[in-house]
Amino acid sequence: MFLAVVGFMTISAQYVAAQTPDPAATETVDQSAAAQQEIPIHQQLKAKFIEGGAGFMASILIVLILGLAIAIERIIYLNLATTNTDKLLKKIEEAFATGGVEAAKDVCRNTKGPVASIFYQGISRMDEGIEVVEKSVVSYGGVQMSQMESGLTWISLFIATAPMLGFLGTVIGLIQAFDSIEAAGDISPNVVAGGMKVALITTVGGLVVGIILQILYNYIVSKIDSLVISMEDASISLIDILVKVKK
């Protein structure tokens, strides 16, 4: 596919180089470029969207919208799930000292986030022994991690789908260019330009969408990793607190 694109560009460049330059045509091109610079950027994007083909560009846009919706939802969820573990551990330790197990449970119930939920599960099983508490914390931590990773599979799918839709538009554009050459019996740039424009615009659109979603995906994964590390450290500190309380 890429070799075909390069071949078309090379042939077109050779054809243009073989033609005698026309001063009037050059002046017209300069005027067109100046007029294009005066057009607002959103209107230029709209024009390129239409030139790339409504079907392929609309499908790429839908992928972008769906991917952004899931990514933004995950970012909001993870930001809300972030907890100051040091402050929470201090409150739990104070609650044990003043009100016992029930007071510590109330602290966890009144605190949002996966860390507080894990702490509540561990404190609820204090009577069964520290080993049971550790297993409960590990098991429920896996559940919370699965909830944080919810939706990442769809984002990965959209990251892979957007460039593929762009490359599909590229292939369709090349086919249109071949059809135009066959119908006209000529390989002039005017004949090839339509198909080549569809081919390149759809590819650019798919790659841009893939890049945007990939950046958001990496941010979400790094956020999840930081939350998991925080959960593990806080769980170890909670076990130490419970050991002291049991003594």
Image: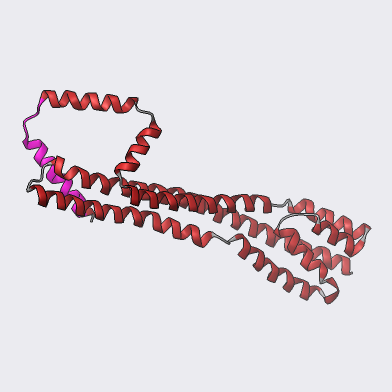
Of residue 21 and residue 103, the one placed in the foreground of this image is: 21
Where, quadrant-wise, is the N terminus in this rendering? bottom left
Residue at image position (11%, 37%) is: 16
Tell me which residue sits at (38%, 49%) in the image: 58
Residue 237 falls left or right of residue 227: right
Residue 154 included in the magenta stretch of the image: no
Q: Position of residue 84 (x, y in %)?
A: 73, 51
Query: Eyeballing the image, is 138 above or below 231?
Result: below
Q: Position of residue 202 (x, y in %)?
A: 32, 48
Q: Residue drawn 71% across and 56% down? A: 113
- In the image, residue 70 lies at what x, y percent? 54, 54
Viewport quadrant of the C terminus: bottom right
Q: Is residue 52 left or right of residue 9?
A: right
- Position of residue 210 in the picture relative to residue 119 (left or right): left
Work out whether 116 lies above or below 199.
Answer: below
Determine the image quadrant of residue 148.
bottom right
Magenta span main SS:
helix
Residue at 8% from the left image edge and 46% from the top image edge? 186
Where does the magenta region start and end?
3-22
Q: Nearer the viewer, residue 69 or 220?
A: 69
Tell which of 37 and 243 is nearer to you: 37
Q: Position of residue 131 (x, y in %)?
A: 77, 75
Q: Total marks drawn? A: 0
Q: How is the image coloured?
A: secondary structure
